[in-house]
Amino acid sequence: MTKIMNGTPAANSGIRAGDILLQVGNKKVREPEDVLDASFFITAGDTVPITVLRGNEKLTFNVQSDLHPASQRPPLIVAPSINQAIPLKLDAQVERRP
């Protein structure tokens, strides 16, 4: 049975807590590890069909994937001289020289 975090793409698509997860994309779900296996082939922004069993009815929801909530916060580096953490922004262009 599924647990759904509020505000996630799955919750916003109509999937409910208690739905039984049958398939994520092309991967059939037989055990929890199958969900992790399926996630390796999903990129943020992809629309993924997710099939669930709700009561006696099979339902398929098209869910647009998003970044994992933990990856939406920038990593921090510690600056001992000022005794605080500084956000590390990784989206800047890096100049490469041969």
Image (spheres, helix red, strand yellow):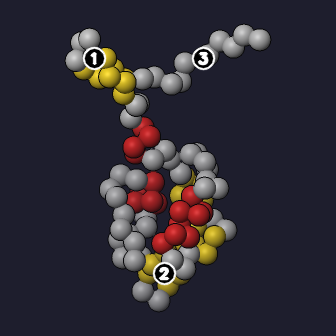
Q: Is residue 50 above or below residue 84?
A: below
Q: Examine the image and state in which quarter residue 77 appears.
A: top left
**Residue closer to the observer: 70 or 62:** 70
The picture places residue 59, in percent across and down from the top left corner, at 53, 76
**Residue closer to the observer: 28 or 94:** 94
Residue positioned 45% across, 59% down in the render: 10
Amino acid found under the numbered disc labelled 2: Leu
According to the image, label 3 marks what residue? 93
Which circle, 3 or 1, is nearer the viewer? 1
Find numbered disc 3 in the image and state the secondary structure of the residue it sits on: loop
Q: Is residue 33 left or right of residue 12?
A: right
Q: Is residue 80 left or right of residue 45?
A: left
Quarter holding the C terminus is top right
Crowding at label 2, few (<14), some or many (≥20) Cα neighbours within 10 Å?
some
According to the image, label 1 marks what residue? 80
The picture places residue 79, in percent across and down from the top left corner, at 31, 17
Quarter holding the N terminus is bottom left
> How much space separates mark 2 and mark 3, taking CA atoms?
45 Å
Q: Is residue 96 above or below residue 31?
A: above
Point out which mark residue 32 bears: none
Find numbered disc 2 in the image and state the secondary structure of the residue it sits on: strand
**Which badge, 3 or 1, is on the more N-terminal residue?**
1
